[in-house]
Amino acid sequence: MTTAIAVSHGGHGVPPIPSMEGPAPKRIVVSFGFWIFLLSDIVMFSAIFATYAVLARATAGGPTGAQLFHLTTVGVETTCLLLSTFTCGLMSLAINLGRRGATYLGGAVTFLLGAVFLTLEIREFAAMFAEGATPQRSAFLSGFFTLVGCHGLHVAIGLIWLTVMMVQVASKGFSPFVHHRLLCFSLFWHALDIIWVALFSIVYLMGAR
Amino acid sequence: MDPTPRDRAPGDETMPEAKREETLAGLQAYLIGLLFAAILTATSFWTATTSVLWSPGVATGLVVLAIAQMGVHLVFFLHITTGPDNTNNVLALAFGILIVGLVVIGSIWIMAHLNANMMPSGNLPNLQMQR
């Protein structure tokens, strides 16, 4: 790859090969490592998705997805998470400019939208439990609660992480370490929305039909 | 500043120089991403609820829309591009997609075959799975 770049730039001064300039800057190493972690997390989700896909029709005479899912709720949840990914992106722009006020605002809106998402999901779960649709009822429901619950758990962890990061910005300012952590957080939050896209398409939209 | 192409981190949108312009470009990318994602999401919900479309094809359509939206998120929100400073990130992503594909498609394929081979008759679909 590096050879190809060097050749393509050959006409106007060959740039030095990146690996010969010594190790990459810390933030690139940190966020590349976090990117690898995120991909491993996505691989874990793919196993849970595969389990769900295999068990989706095994309702054991219990309630089916079409009876349990309310697409209006799912639509609101999807909107919340998509908007919070967007505001998280705006927050990282504010961080790069070094503006604290805009960072707090972006963080607060992101947190609020994430919290609305989580509240709606918990209420949805509670309504299902009240109808007797518990994870023990059928293989389909075990798979459903594992998959959606695991995503919800990630969102909850993201909300805690976001709170911690806002406290760190307040107490330590935009130090390089805080920068790296905020970069990792925004990657995490964007990745959660990618998983939700697969989740609402496969679980809810296909299940509700 | 450093003019040589450095590896770029996933999620990066700004370089040290010309921050204001870079911020505007970043904002534009996020807005385009939000627009595409909103259109694709709305299309998915419409596809799932409408009776206009040929119903056996809807599932395929939803999968295609979901994959398209994941691509939009990767490019506009995670800033995974095809640029030379992004090679490592793209290679890692390619490996991740390979594993995800093997796990999901492989599981569904194998379990569908097992189901087909275990069933005494086509009239009792998924009896095995309901135990």
Image: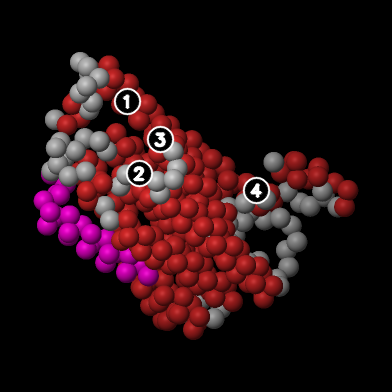
Rendering coords of residue A89 (x, y %): 51, 67
Q: Residues within 10 Å of mark 1 (few under 14, many from 20)?
A: some
Quadrant into which the N terminus of chain A falls: top right
Q: CA distance from mark 3 to mark 1?
A: 18 Å
Residue visible at 66% across and 68% down in the picture: B25
Residue at 20% over, 57% down: A125
* Location of mark 4 (residue): B82
Q: Nearer the viewer, mark 1 or mark 4?
A: 1
Q: Residue at x 82, y 48 (%)?
A: A9
Q: Is residue A126 magenta?
A: yes
Which residue bears the numbered disc 3? B56
Q: Which residue is mark 1?
A: B112
Q: Chain of mark 1?
A: B
Local secondary structure at mark 1 = helix
**SS category of the residue bearing label 2:** helix
Q: Is residue A207 above or below residue B121?
A: below
Q: Is residue B1 visible?
A: yes
Q: Assess whether residue A41 is covered by the magenta stretch.
A: no
